Amino acid sequence: MNQLTTAHIQEAAEYIRAKTADRPEIGLILGSGLGVLGDHMTDVTVIPYHDIPHFPISTVEGHAGELLIGTLAGRKVVLMRGRFHMYEGYGPELTAFPVRVMKALGAGALIVTNAAGGIDTGFGTGDLMLITDHINLTGRNPLIGPNDDELGARFPDMSEAYSKRLRQIATEQAAAQGFELRSGVYAGLLGPSYETPAEIRMLRTLGADAVGMSTVAEVIAARHSGLEVLGISCISNMAAGILDQPLSHAEVMGTTERVKSKFLGLVLAVIPQI
Ligand code: HPA
């Protein structure tokens, strides 16, 4: 087990603090193709992941691999352009490590976004879905191993993993912008193969509305750290077997590209309200 300790977190945070005087209040983790938010930051300090002690390096196309610290919609934020997935071979604690660092930098809230396959047949591609809850089907957990009580509780409560307060804000802001924000349960799987149609039928029976390969480890670590979480999925494709067509990463990227202004508008409107 490659256990990351408070010392590793502090070392990464100290490196970042030495690069900027900004003390971020909100962390953002952006999914495939959604890194565009970073372009709207001002007074930004860009730090490549490979320069930050103990940070893993992102390998997926569409994920840039840099940490941005600066101002977004009037608030100080730390934004991950590109995230780490367990399917890349990282353990869950490494996947969640940046969340720990965000907390150490002073963040009190985390916005996570992802691309996801729509399971609810009422959804359409390009819809944005507010994550109301998740089902962790990765079989992994970033909290496995000795617990550091200074970071959080041994058995953290997950009954409100996705903050009601932040969900309310997002719902109001979407309505103000004239679009309907879908909501539902996100099933987090390991990937990287997409699901089979039988697996999607199973997930529907289990109560999932969308499926993806990220987010759950980060959110578990965030809740363990006491961060308030807002999660938004971009329904980039309908899940396997729902439409009579194959799934592709190109479709996922194409849809996120198409909806990025809607996504951007929502997040920029939410941030000042947090
Ligand atoms: N399944 C899993 N992960 C995904 C999907 C999907 O259909 N679309 C985007 N990420």
Image (spheres, helix red, strand yellow):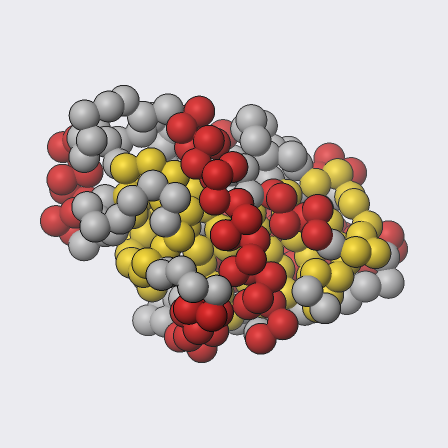
Question: Is residue 135 left or right of 121 when viewed as pictured?
Answer: right
**Nearer-the-camera pick, 166 or 23:** 166
Q: Quadrant of residue 150?
A: bottom right
The location of residue 16, given as percent across then percent down, is: 79, 53
**Quarter holding residue 195:** top left
Describe residue 219's horizontal placement relative to residue 186 as left or right.
Answer: right
Q: How many marks?
A: 0
Tell me if residue 214 comes above or below residue 266 in the rendering.
above
Image quadrant holding the C terminus, namely bottom right
Residue 6 in view in this figure: no
Residue 161 vertical position relative to residue 250 in the rendered view, above or below: below
Visible residue check, residue 258: yes
Q: Residue at 57% of width from left, 31% of height from top?
A: 62
At horizontal 29% and vertical 44% (from top left) the residue drawn is 124
- The residue furthest front is 178
223 left or right of 193 in image: right
> Horizontal and vertical percent for residue 108?
60, 71
Q: Residue at left 66%, top 36%? A: 65
**Along the line of sight, which residue is nearer the eye, 15 or 271?**
271
117 relative to 86 in the view: left or right: left
For this rendering, which residue is in front, 174 or 41?
174
Residue 138's place in the image compared with 198, above or below, is below
Question: Where in the figure is residue 138, as x and y percent of width and height?
Answer: 33, 42
Q: Position of residue 46 (x, y in %)?
A: 79, 45
Residue at 41 percent of width and 47 percent of height: 234
